[in-house]
C-alpha cells in the first residue's frame, strides 16, 4: 500500500517529511484552502527524492494555471478536486498522471466516477463535505465494497495511523494508496512527522512494502 501525504506548504516541514519517503507528496494550489502552497518556493521540493512523486491539487482551475504550476513545481500528477469534466481530465492525461477526486457519503456517489473511467489514472474517494478536502472527517469505508469501477483509487478523508488495521480488513484490491492530511497535522499545512512516520510504519507492516512508483 502506498502513502500520500497531502497539504504540504512549509519548506522545513517538507524536508522533514521527505526523509520518511512517502510515495506521494501533495501540494494544494487552491487559494480557498488553509494549506495553499502557491507561495512555496519551488526549490523547497528539491528535498524530495525521485521515489516520492509530486502531486498538485487543483479545484476548478483554468488549464493555463494548472499547466503553469505543474511546470514551475515539476509535478508528476495532477489531482483535480473540483467539478472538472472528463474532457478537462483527458486534456492533461497525455502529459501527467491524473487523479480525479469524488466526495462519498453513500454508495450512490460512486456512480459519478463512471464517466471518468478512461480519462483518469486514479480516482480519490474523500468524505463528502462542503469543503474541498482536509475536513478531518471520515466516511464509512465499508461503502467501498460496492465500488465496481476498474480505475484504482486513493482512499482519503480523516485517516489516522490507528485506522490502518481496519482498512486492511476491508480487503480493497483496487486501493492504490492511502491519502493523509489533517489527522497527521500539528496545524493546517504543518505535519507531525512522528504521526506520519507511525502511519507509514503501520501501513508497511500491515500491507508490506509497496511496488515502486
Image (cartoon, grey):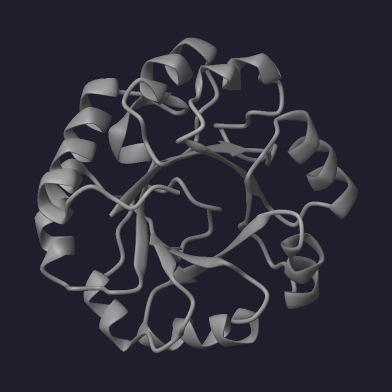
On the picture, is 29 further left or further right than 109? right
Q: Residue furthest right?
A: 64
Relative to 104, residue 46 above or below: above
Residue 87 position by quadrant:
bottom right
**Residue 57: x %, y % from top left:** 62, 46
Q: Closer to the camera, 101 or 19?
A: 19
**Residue 100: x %, y % from top left:** 59, 65
Q: Residue at x 53, y 14 (%)?
A: 11
Q: Residue at x 31, y 66 (%)?
A: 139
**Residue 113: x %, y % from top left:** 55, 80
Q: Residue at x 38, y 56 (%)?
A: 156
Q: Residue at x 45, y 45 (%)?
A: 134
On the picture, is 35 further left or further right than 61? left
Number of numbered labels in the structure image: 0
Q: Residue furthest top?
A: 12
Residue 155 position by quadrant:
bottom left
Residue 149 position by quadrant:
bottom left
**Residue 205: x %, y % from top left:** 11, 45
On the picture, is 27 further left or further right than 164? right
Q: Quadrant of the N terminus?
A: bottom left
Relative to 157, residue 169 above or below: below
Q: Residue furthest front?
A: 212
Amino acid at each position: 500500500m502506498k502513502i500520500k501525504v497531502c497539504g504540504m506548504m512549509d519548506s522545513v516541514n517538507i524536508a522533514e517529511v521527505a526523509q520518511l519517503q512517502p510515495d506521494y507528496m501533495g501540494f494544494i494550489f487552491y487559494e480557498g484552502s488553509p494549506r495553499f502552497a502557491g507561495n512555496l518556493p519551488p526549490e523547497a521540493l528539491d528535498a524530495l527524492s525521485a521515489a516520492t512523486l509530486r502531486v498538485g491539487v487543483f479545484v476548478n482551475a483554468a488549464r493555463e494555471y494548472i499547466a503553469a504550476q505543474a511546470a514551475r513545481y515539476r509535478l508528476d500528477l495532477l489531482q483535480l478536486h473540483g467539478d472538472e469534466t472528463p474532457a478537462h481530465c483527458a486534456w492533461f492525461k497525455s502529459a501527467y498522471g491524473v487523479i480525479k477526486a469524488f466526495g462519498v457519503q453513500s454508495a450512490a456517489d460512486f456512480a459519478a466516477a463512471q464517466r471518468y473511467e478512461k480519462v483518469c489514472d486514479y480516482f480519490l474517494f474523500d468524505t463528502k463535505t462542503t469543503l474541498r478536502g482536509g475536513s478531518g472527517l471520515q466516511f464509512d469505508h465499508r461503502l467501498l465494497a460496492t465500488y465496481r469501477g476498474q480505475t484504482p483509487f486513493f482512499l482519503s478523508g480523516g485517516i489516522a495511523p490507528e485506522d490502518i488495521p481496519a482498512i486492511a480488513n476491508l480487503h480493497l484490491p483496487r486501493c492504490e494508496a492511502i491519502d493523509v492530511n489533517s489527522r497527521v497535522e500539528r496545524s493546517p499545512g504543518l505535519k507531525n512527522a512522528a504521526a506520519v512516520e507511525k502511519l507509514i510504519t503501520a501501513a508497511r507492516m500491515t500491507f508490506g512494502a509497496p511496488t515502486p512508483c
